[in-house]
Amino acid sequence: MAEAWTRRTERSHPFVLHAIAWVARRLGRGAARAMLHLGVAYYMIAAPAARRASRDYLARVLARRPRWHHSYRHLYAFATVFLDRMYMLGGADSPLSITHHGVQSFRDCVERGQGGIIMVSHLGSFEALRALSDRRDDLTVRILMNWATGAKMNAVLQKLDPGFGDRVIDTATADVDRVLKVKAALDRGEMVGIMADRVHAGERTVDCDFLGGTAPFPATPWLLAGMLGVPVFLAFGLYRGGGHYDLYCEQFSPGLSLPRGERMQRTGAWTQAYADRLAEHVRQAPYNWFNFYQFWH
């Protein structure tokens, strides 16, 4: 089911990743994107489970039976977004353009000296959010993520940006240590991004209606937000083709509360509301959602 992604072996080869990074830097984005076709073709052949998951998802979001070229486009969009992460971490020479929508909600929070939680997802590029923080000295965004599941890719990004790892809170650490790090970041007036669309093994879940089916979403992000009582935001960095992204930001709540006896009921309502907002953005950019495993029950 949904936690099966944690058992997937990372297929990326370090040499290939570093070669793509070299081409991207020396020869440009066009040459690097052409190189991606080799990797996508290999993945179409060597990763049947991911291919099936792509077809299942695309059938739901496109409302028709997808053909092989739909899955190829889906995988190529994923590869392009990964490539663009290198540019987003690379500073002023980036060939990308990012249009921001609703970022004033972040700025208002920062200007009050208040930290907040941002619910992010595997839709498009959450790196667009950190690219925004790199351009603003008063806005720091840290992301909760499992470093080990993408260790090879992360090593490449770390080489491109030595400060990359410093902005990550590793979810592989003990629960108490992780919560303390999140609390410390919020107390410093920073934003903390949490992946709200992927379940870890053994994690408590909420079954939500999503794209015409029932799927498990993690309850932990909402329980944590309710426990800390800070403002909660949503952010979606949609890849629009070419070199353009749209970063959509919105305030979800000025502060969630968890009264005794209503914890799971409220958590379920918040999770479903998030799943509904995610579905709206997924339909805007159907080839942007990158959960390549069996997501629905």
Image: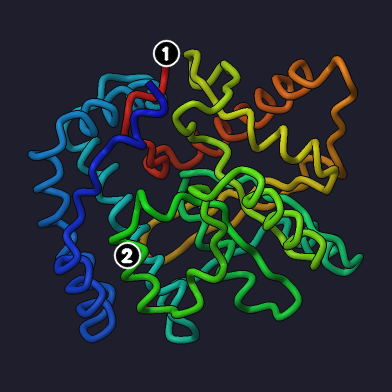
Q: Which residue is drawn at 73% across and 62% down?
A: 185
Which image quarter is the N terminus in? top left
What is the number of the mark on residue 224? Answer: none
Decide: is 107 above or below 232: below
Could you tell me residue 262's position as x and y percent?
Answer: 84, 17
Q: Of the residues tagged 2 and 1, which is closer to the observer?
A: 1
Q: Which residue is drawn at 42% across and 55% down?
A: 147
| Disc 2 from disc 1: Cα separation | 32 Å
Residue 255 position by quadrant:
top right
Q: Mark 1 points at which residue?
A: 297
Q: For the residue marked with disc 2, what is the amino acid? A: Leu
Name the side, left or right, on which 287 lies relative to 245. left
Which image quarter is the C terminus in? top left
Decide: is 94 above or below 168: below
Could you tell me residue 11's position as x and y percent?
Answer: 19, 49
What is the number of the mark on residue 83? Answer: 2
Label 2 secondary element: helix
Q: For the residue marked with disc 1, what is the amino acid? A: His
Instruction: Look at the image and tell me whether residue 31 can be seen.
Output: no
Could you tell me residue 187's position as x and y percent?
Answer: 82, 62
Could you tell me residue 260's position as x and y percent?
Answer: 89, 20
Q: How crowded is mark 2: few (under 14 residues within 10 Å), some or many (20 or more)?
A: some
Label 1 secondary element: loop
Q: Residue at x 58, y 24 (%)?
A: 204
